[in-house]
Amino acid sequence: MNKKLVIPGQFLSSNVKNAGSGTYIDDGKVYSLLYGILNDKKRINVLPFSGKYIPSRNDLVIGTVIVVTPSNWIFELGSAFDGLLHVSEFPRRIESAQMKGVMSVGDSAIIRIKDVNPAMKVEITMRERGLRVIKEGRVIEIMSTKVPRLIGHSGSMISMLKKETNCEIFVGQNGRVWINGKDNDMDRLGKAIDLISSNSNASGLTDMVYKFLKSESDVEDDVDTNTVSEDVEDIQTDDVEEVSEDTSRKIDMLLDPEDE
Amino acid sequence: MSKPEKFFDENGLRLDGRRVDEIRPMKIEVGVLSRADGSCYLEWGNNKVLAGVFGPRELHPRRMQRPDTAIVRYRYNMAAFSVEDRIRPGPNRRSTEISKVSREAFEPVILTHLYPSAVIDVFTEVLQADAGTRTAAINAATIALADAGIPMKGLVSACAVGKVDGKLVLDLGKDEDNYGDADLPVAMTQDGDVTLIQMDGNLTQDEFKEAMELVKVGCKQILDIQREALKSKFDQFDTEEIEEETVVEAPKSEVEIDETVEVETEVVVTEEEEVVETEEEEVVDTEEEEVVDTEEVEEEVTADDENDEEPDKNTDDEDVEEGETNE
Amino acid sequence: MSEVMSKLKKDYVYNLMLKGQREDGRAFDEMRAITVETNVIDKAEGSAKVQYGDTQVLVGVKLQLGTPFPDSPDVGVIITSLELNPIASPTFESGPPRENAIEMARVTDRGIRESGAIDLTKLCITKGEKVWMIFIDVHVLNDGGNILDAASLGAIAALMTAKVPAERNGVGEDFMIPVREMPVGISVVDIGGELIVDPGRNEEAVCDTKISITSNQDGSICAMQKSGEGALSEKQVLKAVTLACEKAAKVRENYLLKI
């Protein structure tokens, strides 16, 4: 196992054929470009600890309108680059005068990156099923590099979160997460996402988050709700405090049967 | 303060007890500002500097953008109270020059072409000045850039060498700086390429050669301290845990999911690796579906999705400009 | 550069408020965790680093000899500056202070000046010719909201640790700046009719009105500023004053009296 913390300029390998993302080649050697974690299981990749989202064609993201012009909405994407949604990329015909009525500054939407040109001009589309303005729920921001951790292997983490909190969840590739459900469920889910985001380097994360959600819902049971998911009771036996790593693996398997 | 009678004691040690080739103690903290994308607080002798990095981010006004590359902006600023006699806040001719050469010290290592049209802002604040503030600021800025996840070919380390009483010394202290005969601040990459060099005073060519040798030693020591600071930020995770990290392609933001199988011992390493490889294959497929909550999403939009009206590029640009002036 | 806050975020903060809650779990009348470190900058005659949650400001006090103003020939001079450095927030830009920074500098200054915190008569050396000029420089390092209160606490804390460098300037022996009052500024914002103290960054962005009240040890008020585009009812103003004086007493007791 050769995963370790690396810093920019650190020598990684002499095998230039395997140089992957977050690396560069100089004089027949591979070096790190980034401050992050080395993964050289297959190719030599460096996963940065932080960094801005870079728009990439076909990504689904959540954006916030910052400017409305007679024929475009400009979205802020939590990135180095804003995105342009031309009125023709909206699913229905809009007259110039109606632009602000459809989406105005501060509105958020689930959008797809249609194209990114070499100068990083980002074009957006909403002409697709599912892409829409978000009017309710909350948007939580995490580092875009932590998106995979939130989704989990084959979606295991996200499935668990949905099940445990009865919330709808949409994870944008830019690290913006839209959640919608009952207020107290969203509170729990928000805290769980924070937990994932701040412990993304820890092992047994699904287990940790599951435990956390259980303990939070227990507290809330005493107060006013009875939202504990029953499916989970089937998976998990009585003593929540003693969930082992094994259990979390079992949960992953149960939620994702095709997986193994 | 007046000029000291002598700069070296009978043992050849300097006013503060250092050897001629010894730098002042340096202390580095990584990630100290919540609003910056990357940050660093650095103390070096009595210097106290703070560096914050923002970006890459949108550059306004748009006419300053360069379509093929990001630009770097660097601000060297001294707090009014950072020196003996208060200075007026805000830029002056000295800080403007230092900002320029410091920016140029980083341009060779930052992969600016990965972020066309954008800007990377590096702000350094000298909170307390005690000789060598520009080099201190550069040393802090490097760490802040790494902390912000900015791709760089390596760190930049900076140190000054100078001449006092006819003798070359590394990393000038305050008195040595004030009353010395020469001051030569240098910044270099890990390969020893010089990205900043300035000099004032007087050195013979032989002295200069010797000075360069000395400054290399200093920059190397600083590079080690910088590396150590970055490595220790994540001390709380033991390596075992770090090995279970997920993978994101960077900087191109292709997301792969590699939810690791819980590894318990090193013994099963070979099996583990096979398992993981197959999983990574699957993941690429599942990712898109998993990201969108499809059930939810399908209801609202019914229109078919063929795009028959290509947006007119020219009008696009005009609109953007218009939008900005209205802002 | 202005930051656009999404409507969802605004609604969230606003709706929490309607439920009697705040984003970080505080009560409406609860301050964030405060830390005050003094004498952090040797080059300054007095200094303090203050944190309110993740807001960080560094205040330095420097003294120089100068000429008094003609209309007050026998007292020292106070000059307060505040810089919203671009390092402190993605929305701050380089350049000379704009109206927000100037407003905050002036409100900080008023708290110190009008409370009579410093006995300025003791800072006169030769009437009409030579007096001490006190420069209070507030260097904002990280904007987590409510910079003003952190600046005002930092200013008085730095003054309390400041020594007049008389010896170095050949005008007698060094002495501590004669501080005789400890003004503390507390800001209260109105969100949906509710008053909350020590607003965090998002709360500051959502509220349309803020009132900052600086009060003294005896509970009297020495400076006040309403800012923001909204209006406050008379009842709210009165309530804000009571709240601010109460909180100021606690902050004074916990941080200033321990210096």
Image (cartoon, coloured by chain):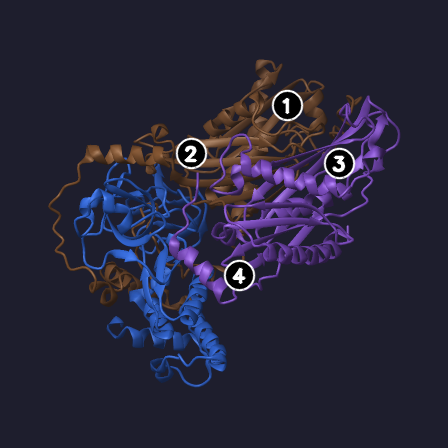
Chain colours: A blue, B brown, C purple
Residue A61 at x, y percent in the picture: 30, 53
Other-residue count near label 1 (Cα within 10 Å), few / some / many at <14 / 14–19 / ≥20: many
Q: Amino acid at mark 4?
A: Asp
Q: Residue furthest bottom?
A: A238
Considering only order in the chain, which callout, 4 or 3, is on the residue closer to the N terminus?
4
In this rendered view, identify the residue nearer to me: B306 or C127.
C127
Disc 4: which residue: C24
Element type where label 2 sits in the image: loop
Q: Chain of mark 3?
A: C
Give how far apart the Cα atoms at labels 3 and 2 are. Answer: 40 Å
Q: CA distance from mark 1 to mark 2?
A: 26 Å
Amino acid found under the numbered disc labelled 1: Gly
Residues indicated by labels 3 and 1 sit on the same polypeptide chain = no
| Residue picked out by circle 3 | C45
Q: Which image quadrant: the N terminus of chain B?
A: top right
| Chain holding disc 1 | B
Looking at the picture, how far across and down is residue C47, in whole percent?
71, 41
Type of the residue with mark 2: Val
> Looking at the rendered structure, which numbered label has been put on residue B162?
1
State whether discs 2 and 4 lie on one chain. no
Quick check: can you spot residue B264? no
Q: Which residue is mark 2?
A: B109
Question: Residue A244, relative to residue B86: is it above or below?
Answer: below
